[in-house]
Amino acid sequence: MNRSITFTDLYNSLKFTAAMTVLFAASFLVTSICILSYIKSSQEKELVEYVEEIKDLYVEDGYESVLHEFDLEEQPIWDRVESIERLVDHEFIFALVDRGVLLVGSKLEFSSNTEPEWSSFDLQSEHDFQLLTLSIALTEDVSLSIAQPLSYEYMFSKELLWRASLIGVVLITLILFFIRLLFNYRRRLEIQTLMAQLDEVSRSPDSVRLRCEVNDSALRDLTLSINLMLDKVSKLHGTTKTMSVGIAHDLKTPLSRVANRLQSMAQDVGDDIAITSHISHATKDLHSVISTFNNLVRLNSIESGKHKQNFQLINLSELINDLALSYEPVFEDSGRLLSHSTVDCVSCFGDKDLLSQLLCNLLENALEYSNEGSRVWIRLQSHTNGALLQVGDNGLGIDKEDQPYIFDRFYRADLGRTKPGNGLGLSIVKAICDVHGASLVLLPDQSGAVFNIEVPISNQ
């Protein structure tokens, strides 16, 4: 594991820092523009108010009051040089004009309007000014024009913001770079640790899991997701192994018997009765093999969901009654009692053939695994959210150790496989329930095997 800072760490840190620095600079620039614009706007407002005061003074007290307001004891006339000196000293200049004749103020020509206006004043020297100008009529003949340079407050704020931006950019760049570099370094170490653990998992995927030894929440979530995936894969692997063993056993036994029958037929050539018996038994064994494959194909077909295209409104009560009546003689002949109790006119959307197979599989299961003299029942009850279908018996039931696995493919509680079957019956029942949106549970702590199925019903 490489614990030193790599070029990739530096490169990624620089990219992140550059992006964040540009974002900071842009944000600071926008903020600075807003602040300076506000200061300019305040200066415009103050100038308008000041000129209005001058006008009121002139109207009330005349010309002398205006000079007094401007702190002028005499009536100065400023030439171009003197006007520029005042602007350099951040003092305003003005021109009081009576019918085109300058009474007092600056000879410097500057544009002015009746509304505050900013304009650049090019002196063709080292001093260029941005002036705020305003003109107002004191009387019909007398007008006052004022020009102000940018205020001290504006210049100070501009300089302060400029220095702050430079210092801020440098500090932000350095701080973000080292923070991001540290983050990238730690993240790379955590990823390398995760990769090392994944290498361990690859050697023992069924037993070894990733350890959540990371601080990054995203990597921690990824670790948990990988562990969850590994658990599912391990479960699938176990199911596949069980299926492989089940298929091998379910095919090996009948095929071995067929092979033995063929050998016996070779020995009994000429004995028609023996040959007929061998053919009958071999055919029965081959039908068992074909049944296993047919059930597998059927199960995959059900799980694919393509049967939903054939869903229609089905009278579930009528379907259950018909099947129960057809199975009653079978149970009676086997020394068992089948009873049924259904609520009338319970309907649902589904595939009639699939629902019939669901009931047949459960009844065949009860017929196969319950003792002689056992009682088997089918009940259908209706309630607000759906219908409750129950199929159960009072036989030996299913061991608690086997109950979590009874819906898995090829799982059989009869590990010795002394009874016929391929372990797909309840898997098909579960698949049919899933495709119909029904829930299937095996009730715990019962004297026999009791299955509850919640079926969504239709009110049509």
Image: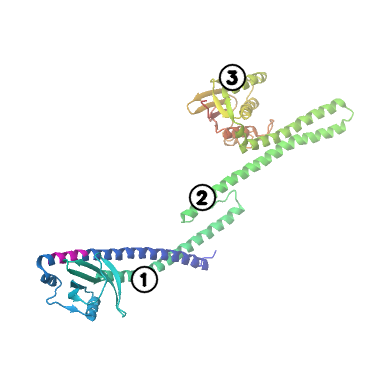
The label on residue 339 is 3
Three-letter residue code for mark 3: Ser
Name the residue nearer the viewer: 318 or 116. Answer: 116
Is residue 411 toward the left or the right of residue 280 in the image? left
The residue wearing badge 2 is: 224
Q: Within 10 angstroms of label 1, few (less than 14), some, or many (20 or more) residues?
A: few
Identify residue for label 1: 166
Dot 1 or dot 2, earlier in sequence: 1
Please state which of residues 75 and 171 is positioned toward the viewer in this rendering: 75
Under mark 2, the amino acid is Leu
The three-letter code of the residue at mark 1 reads Leu
Camera-side mark, 1 or 2: 1
Q: Give the range drawn in magenta.
A: 48-57
* Label 2 Cα neighbours within 10 Å, binned few <14 / some 14-19 / many ≥20: some
In terms of secondary structure, where does tag 3 sit? strand
Asked if the residues shown at circle 2 and circle 3 are in contact, with their CB atoms under 8 angstroms apart, the answer is: no
Whole-Å distance between the Cαs marked 1 and 2?
45 Å
Residue 203 locus on image (x, y percent) = 61, 54
Q: In this view, does 345 lie above or below 306?
A: above
